[in-house]
Every structure is written in structure tokens, then in C-alpha cells.
Image (cartoon, coloured by chain):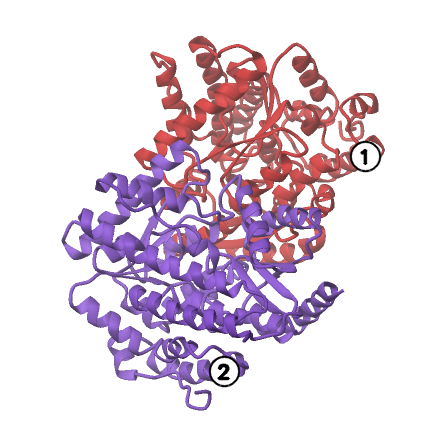
Chain colours: A purple, B red
Amino acid sequence: MSSEFQVKSDPELWEKLGMDVPRFSGMPTMLTNAYRGIFLSQKNRPEAMAYFDTMVENIHTGRIREIVDAKESGKPVIGTFCVYVPEELVVAAGGICIGLCGGAQGSIADAEKILPRNICPMVKSAFGFKVGKICPYFQVVDLVYGETTCDAKKKTWELLDRYVPTHVMEIPQMKRERDKVLWVEEVKEFKTAVEKITGNTTDFDAIAGGIRTINAKRAALQRLNSLRHHNPSPISGKDMLLIEQIAFYDEPVRFAKKVHELCDELDRRIKDGVAVAPKSTPRILVSGTPMALPNWKLHHIIESSGAVVVNEESCIGTRYYKDLIEEGSENVEQQLERLTERYMKIDCSCFTPNDDRIDQVIREYEESAAEGVIDYCLQFCHTYNIEAVKLREACEKRGIPFMAIETDYSPDDVGQLQTRVEAFIEQIRG
Amino acid sequence: MSSEFQVKSDPELWEKLGMDVPRFSGMPTMLTNAYRGIFLSQKNRPEAMAYFDTMVENIHTGRIREIVDAKESGKPVIGTFCVYVPEELVVAAGGICIGLCGGAQGSIADAEKILPRNICPMVKSAFGFKVGKICPYFQVVDLVYGETTCDAKKKTWELLDRYVPTHVMEIPQMKRERDKVLWVEEVKEFKTAVEKITGNTTDFDAIAGGIRTINAKRAALQRLNSLRHHNPSPISGKDMLLIEQIAFYDEPVRFAKKVHELCDELDRRIKDGVAVAPKSTPRILVSGTPMALPNWKLHHIIESSGAVVVNEESCIGTRYYKDLIEEGSENVEQQLERLTERYMKIDCSCFTPNDDRIDQVIREYEESAAEGVIDYCLQFCHTYNIEAVKLREACEKRGIPFMAIETDYSPDDVGQLQTRVEAFIEQIRG
């Protein structure tokens, strides 16, 4: 597989989508090389990873064509930047929901022509992808649906709207009854925005179907994460992260099926004692801000330093799939209420207070048999950065080794981070 | 006056308030020297500034004693960090509302022992004042009432609560009907929190009185700002800024009276052609983030560079006083509704969209006969920093000279800022 792996190109398709084709044409080769070095160099990968490798090969071609075909048949395509925007309602309307968060250094210079430099790299990367016309997903969406979960995103959507129709969902900052009242209204408004594209009202059965589909996707990821927690690890942290990233752009039914196939293989591996690293390998839980594709920086540093990542407590990880929507509602109102209740369980640091998250990290630490916590903070992300004060205290109180890292997508600090991570792993080894 | 000016000390009072007296004892001399250099060195100041000089002399003593006396007689003392927390309801309950935003470099190191370094200096300064026990106002409050207007403040309140009882008002991020519904509830909760201290319900007449008092204070500042807009300027930008800062800790009735006395003098000055700078002096409107006492950095740079500041479009300036609450309500419900409506007019960049603010800056630019806009952004304040993109465009479209500055409280960049400001003023001179 390794030597054959090749991220595919389709300049004709890209041209049709209004991309900057000359500029983008170097991207597949860059991604191919990065992927070979970071993923395919791993030893003893599960065979079922082949599907996810294929998803990377087709990231700018095959999957895009699927989405274009769906769009041409009248299905809505919605781009989002946050796990608070309910994809169930897009799926219910027969549409496709794509996570557009940017994880690449390459688009940041485009963004910095307009945005301040000292804001979150994820926001800059996403904005730069659109401004530079170098992301096929951004080009194919009918509209993007942002939210108000941080200062930088909230204000960037005002500028993004000049390049692509941008709606904004107001996510409250507390979780009391009156916040829920507002939140349910926001969910209804989102539903209406999706329906405007299709021209049809999404009815009870359709919503039930959307909830079922996305519940199933999240349940598959829950199963995978549980298996992955086994010691010794049957799958690497990098491969798990990749799957979690693919969850944001793959077709959800197929994706869940492939995740279960992988789980079946991991079941066999565990039974057969097959692992990606010996039991003595230090086990790291990564908490904090999400890692959008192709941001594999920290995981690659950790796993190149002789440890294994055993859990992602982040929006790319457990925050995305730990909660399901209660099914069996009696009417649309109840469906939307239960949907909102599920979303209110996500413990993003944008909420105040947010102490549930601290408890959740400790819980996941125990469930994953981790031996240390590395809290990952995207540069200038004030909410996670300040919340790290409480997380550090909680870890220190329990004798859990803790390290906080704040970084961006630049390769400049990789050497320094590697040194710090190695020292941390040594500390765990004791 | 100049040679006699001396910020007063009262170690006994400070001791009683639980301050770090040895550490704080150097503060009055430092402030005295800074004030003499920055304010008393100005030529041709209005005589009525004498009162405000006295307010600075008594900032750590006389005014604190007044507040302690009030507190000991059972009156609530509430600390705030934002012009969205309605002081009318504190005054209505017979209490005192104090703006606790920090504007000093000296407390930042205290904060950085706990908080991340790369957040807003105003938040760090305020937090450091409490942690270091070096602010008498922080020591005298019954509780502080924070809000959710930015990521850094919202999350810092969770930590501040360990040092002083900290409540949080959720300020929505949009201004639609459902946001107003939530907002009115927040206002009621604030009212209840103040009432808990007094043990009495604040009734209709008391609220009407509180609204009248604060309306009168804001109206006095409106009058002053209008007079100050006269060309040539009858008062310096630094003196105006100082008065705006004192508005956040002085007794409101006395303050309004003293502002009107100053206005009467400015009326006479304008009639007599007395000004602080000739008509040819370049006139600068400062927009953006607030400047908490003793943050006089940018105004001092601008006015030392041969220009005069003619307007502050910020929470320390017009955003604090441009809107009044409509009086004559028929019941408490209507009072609180109208109060909320007034607060919803404040155009902080924490809202999305917030284009009203862009229009407001242009309006104030015209009203103040300004000749250039310097947009002031506290370091790491993402909302104002990103909103500056739109403000720059609006200014450039109208041919208004525009410069954006992002800085903190450190003296390190003063030389560089001075050079940039001088070049900008030269550009205005043409």
C-alpha cells in the first residue's frame, strides 16, 4: 500500500468549482508525502485502515465528486466549523454536512492579508482556504453555518460572508433554562435555513432518520475509542485521530460501517495479543482544542517520542461522539428539544462555568488507562488556555502527570516541542 | 497646584482592607510622579480640572473612606468590569458601583503567575490587582459582577471567584428579540443579587431614582464631550480621558455637578477664544478598546506628538454615555425593559453583526471635527482587532486617515508608537 498511496488530482473538477487550480495542483503531492511519512511509515497498522487511506487519497477528488453529484441532485451541502452545529438536521434534509475547520499552515498567509496575525491558526487556516480558493469543500458548499463559540470565529464570520453565504448560530455561554430556550430557537432557525435550500420541510420521520444515522456514527466511534483504550493499544493515536478527522467529511452510513469493520479487526487483535506498541509504552491522553485535518503535529511528535496517544478529549475526539440524542420522540418539538439537550452536554470551554469538562477529562483518563495528560491549546485560544489552569490543578491534585502545550501549525517549534514531550515521557517512565 | 499635588496615603485604612501595605506603599509616589508629568505639565488647563486632580489625590484614601463608610452603613458596593452591567440598579439600592478594570502594568506580573501571558492586559491587570491585594477598590467591594463579553474575561471570572465573590451576567452575542428576552432576565438576576446584600427589594421609586441619577451623569458627559468637540479644543484629550475614567469611581451626583461646572468654564473659554491648542492642531478621534485608569499611554503619545485627541469612541468614552434610559415608565417591568433597551444600544464588538458601531465611529468623527482615526486595540482583544478590518475599510472609503494600533501597558513600545503616531500626524498635516 505504502508505495502505491497517492492523493489524487482532478484539475477539471477543481476548475469547475472555481478553485485556484495552478496553486492547488501542488497540494496532492505535498499531502501524499506527508501522509506516507506520518501514517504509512507506522508498523503493524490494522488492515482495515486501508479504507481510511483511500478516503485520504480521494479527499480532493472522489469524495468531492460524490458531494457535487448530491448537490446537483438538489441536496443541500452545509459547511460548519464546530460540533455545536447539528448535522442531524442536514442529514434529515437529505443533505451533506462538512466540517470546514482548517488544519494547514499553507492557507494562513492568505488569511493574514486580511485578518490579524495573532488569532487562532484554525480560524486563519479555514478563512485562508476560502480566500485563496484552495479548498474544494469550501467551494462546494451552499452555505456555511458558523457559530459564536469564540471571539475570533464570531468576528471572522462577518468577513467570511463576503466570500460565501455565512449564517451564524448563537451558542449561549451558560447552560441554564433560559439558555436552553434560546438554543432551541437557534436549532429551529438552522433547520429552516437548511430547508430553504431544499424547498421542503424536514418532517418527523426525516428528523428521526437523521438522528438515527448520526447516533450510529457516534456510536461506532464510541466503540472504536473503547477498543482503542485497551492496553496494549491495538491502534495508534495517529490512526485514531485520522479516523476522527475523516468523520467530518465522509458519508456517515458508510463511515460507520467501515469503523465497525475496523472495530471487528481490533477485537481480533486484542484477542490475539496484537498491538501497535508494547504494554510498557507510556500512554498519553491529549485534551484541549481540536485538530483539524491535516493537523497531525502533536500526535506525530508524541508517537515519535516513544509514547502512544490513547484518547483525544477534544471536539475532534470524545466531545464529538460521547453523547447521543435520545430517540423515540413523539413529535418534532420533542425531537428538537432532545437534540438540543444532547448538544448542551458538549463541554466546550466557551461555557462558564465548565467544570463538567474537568471531571470528564479525569474520567477519560481513567477509562483509557492513560499515564499522563498533554493539554493541547491552539495559539491564542483564550478559553482553553485559561481553563487549563483548572485542569492542571485537577491533575496535580490526583498525581496525574500534566503538561500544557500552546502551539500553532508552524513547523518552527517542532524541535522544541519534541524536547519537551520527550522529557514528559521520561517523567512518566519514572 | 502642580507642585502641591500629591496622591495621598493611608496605610491604616489599607491594612484594615487587607491590602499588601508594604507593597502598595510605593504606589502613591509613582502615581504622583506620573500624574505630574502627564497631566500637570499641560499648559492652560481649565481651572475646574482642580476637582478631578483632587479625585486622583484621593483615589486610594478619601474616596475609599467614603465607600467604606457607605458600606458600614449597610450600602452595597459592587465592582464591575464592563459598561453592560447596569449601575442604575446599584444606585437604586442605595449602593455604590465601581469600575474595576485595571489599567496598570504593575499588577500584570501577579496575574501571570496564574493566567496565560497572551491575554488582554486589562484582564490581567484587574486580576493581578486582586491577587496581589494592591487595589483598595477590589478590597472594599461586597462582590464583583463580571460578564461574558470576551473569552478572556469570561474564563477569568471563574478563577477570580476564588479571591472575591464573582457573579457573571450573560451578555448575548446578538441583538434579536430572543436575545432581549434572555438579557432582561439577566438584568433581573443582577437586581436580585444587589438586593440580597441590602435585604430590601428595590422598588419602582428607587429604580426611577437610580435611572435619573445615572442618566444625569451620562448627560453631563454628553455635554462635556460636545463642548470638547469645539475647534480649537477648549480641553485636552488627556483631561477628557481622565474625567471619563473618574466617572467609574466617583459619586455620581457630585461628579455630574463638577462636570457641569467644568462645562460652564468651557462655555466661557469657547466664547473667549481660549483653547489648549491652536485651531491648526491635528485632531484625532481614538476608537476601540477602553483605557482603564491609569492607562494614559496612547493619549499622552498623541498629545506629545503635536495633535489633540477630540473623541474617545470606546467604553471609557462615548459608548458609556451616548445613550440614556427613557424615563417615565409605569411599572418596574417597564423600567427594566427600557433599561435593557438602553444597554442593548451599546455597540461593543462582542456582538455579531456590529455594523452600527462602524456608522457610529463615522458619526462621531464628523461631530468632533476630527481629521484622523487611531483605532486602539488592547493586545489579544480579538473582537476589536478583527472589527478593525471593517473600520479601516469604512474610513478609507471616505478618505479618512486611519491607523490601527495594538498595544499593552508596557512602556517597551512607546518609542515605536511615538514614531508611528508622529508619521500619522504628519500625514494629516499633509
Q: Quadrant of the N terminus of chain B?
A: top right
B172 lies above or below B425: above
Task: Kindly tell me whether residue B379 is visible in this rendering.
Answer: no
Q: Residues within 10 Å of mark 2 (few under 14, many from 20)?
A: some
Mark 2 vs mark 1: give the one in front: 2
The image shows a total of numbered marks equal to: 2
Q: What percent of the width, then of the height, locates residue B180?
A: 35, 31
- Please report, as a chain letter, where disc 2 is located: A
A159 lies above or below A331: below
Q: Camera-side residue: A360 or A80? A: A360
Residue B277's image quarter?
top right
Asked if badge 2 and badge 1 are on a common chain, one would say no
Label 2: which secondary element: helix
Q: What percent of the width, then of the height, locates residue A345?
A: 43, 45
Label 1: which secondary element: helix
Indicate left or right for B310 with B352 as reference. right
- Compute the Cα span from label 2 to label 1: 66 Å
Give the residue furthest to the bottom: A3
Q: Amino acid at mark 2?
A: Leu
Q: Name the residue carrying label 1.
A: B29
Q: Name the residue carrying label 2.
A: A40
Q: Residue at x 41, y 26 (%)?
A: B185
- Please report, as a chain letter, where disc 1 is located: B
Q: Which mark is residue B256?
A: none
Q: Residues within 10 Å of mark 1 (few under 14, many from 20)?
A: some
Indicate left or right for A83 with B78 as reference. left
Q: Camera-side residue: A345 or B117? A: A345
